[in-house]
Amino acid sequence: MLNGIWLGCQRVKARTAVIPAAGLGTRFLPVTKAVPKELLPIIDMPALQLVMDEAVEVGVDHIVLVSNVNKPGIEAYVRPAADVVQRVRASGRIELADRLARIGTDVRVSVVYQDAPLGLGHAVGCARDVVADEPFVVLLPDELMGDSHLLQSLVDAVDSTGVGAVGLMRVARDEVSSYGVITPADGAPHDGPFRIVDVVEKPKMEDAPSNLIIIGRYVLTPDVFDKIARLSPHANGELQLTDALRAQSAESPLAGLLNKSARYDTGTPMGWLTAVIDIALNRPDTSNALQAWLRGRVEF
Ligand code: UTP
């Protein structure tokens, strides 16, 4: 459906990823008073690291973190720390030392600042000067994916069609009002791919055009920055990325691909808790011990 549509800018695979991490994290207060939710541990890894690894897996070689001066931990995490690596290496934990040595060095990382939390659209716009005039990836670090399949499919789709592509998920009708919801073009197969003809942010259930919501993985074309620059704030004062996508989809095709892997929303305490448990159940070094403990703890 989208094959062969190419809209002009130089055809390059997306290699830059923007990770917006400047939000207030109010749903995770009081912990986010001091700890950015993007650094919450998923066993022993910050959520941010898992998302950065996902980007690197699909060929990203430059990560742009959008942070806020009140969240210094984000920058501290990606800053190489030779002294820590050396201390751990000297203690004989070579594998851990190697892992630590790769943080912030296995991929180029830039940090840009969003002065005020004016919304996701505004946060992505803050990366404009650092993103070259080519397609780029956006990953929301409070959404974790079971693997990098969706992101790889989005990168490949944009490479072959030249139009932006976003990750989608089907939800129950009574959940749509928390998300950006798409209108798919008529005639798409149930499992997509979809051509998106409109997007609406947080519609009432009765007004929602579908139950297909946009999730936190995007590969966008650089013309979206002009749409972001022209955004008007919503009632809550925020500039929504969804509105920029809506403007884009009115002018040029936008694709949507269904996620077929696990997805975790770690932006709330319950979402984070289920993510940690599920990921620990799948990780070889934690799975057996956790299952044994759960069997003793939970009555089935
Ligand atoms: P969220 O809306 O989930 O994050 O944005 P939030 O606003 O921090 O959370 P709540 O609603 O107050 O609990 C998704 C991602 O976009 C970033 C967030 O840091 C998060 O990683 N974001 C959001 C920004 O970088 N800037 C913003 O103005 C808003």
Image (spheres, rainbow, N blue to C red):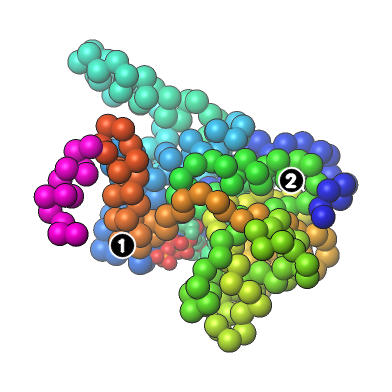
Q: Which residue is mark 2?
A: 158
**From the viewer's perspective, is 122 left or right of 144?**
right
Q: Does ligand 1 reach within 8 Å of label 2's beta carbon? A: no
Which residue is found at the position 42% from the left and 44% from the top? 48
Picture mark count: 2
232 and 106: which one is in front? 106
**From the viewer's perspective, is 29 left or right of 202?**
left
Q: Which residues are magenta?
A: 288-300
Query: Is residue 203 shown above or below 128?
Result: below
Q: Furthest-left residue in view?
A: 296
Of the two numbered discs 1 and 2 on the same chain, state the one appearing first in sequence.
2
Mark 1 residue element? helix
Residue 278: where, in percent of width, then height? 33, 49
Residue 38: where, in percent of width, then height? 39, 50
Q: What secondary structure predominates along the stretch shown in magenta?
A: helix
Which residue is found at the position 42% from the left and 39% from the top? 49
Amino acid type at circle 2 is Val
The CA span between labels 1 and 2 is: 34 Å
Is residue 12 part of the magenta span, yes or no?
no
Residue 181: where, in percent of width, then height? 61, 71
24 and 145: which one is in front? 145
Amino acid type at circle 1 is Met
Q: Which residue is mark 1?
A: 270
Label 2 Cα crowd, 10 Å radius (few <14 / some 14-19 / many 20+): many
Residue 28: where, in percent of width, then height? 32, 63
Which residue is found at the position 35% from the left and 60% from the top? 271
Callout 1 touching callout 2 (CB < 8 Å) = no
Q: Quadrant of the C terminus?
A: bottom left
Is residue 295 part of the magenta span, yes or no?
yes
Q: Furthest-bottom residue in view?
A: 206
Query: Is residue 131 visible in the rendered structure shown here?
Result: no
Which residue is found at the position 81% from the left and 38% from the top? 11
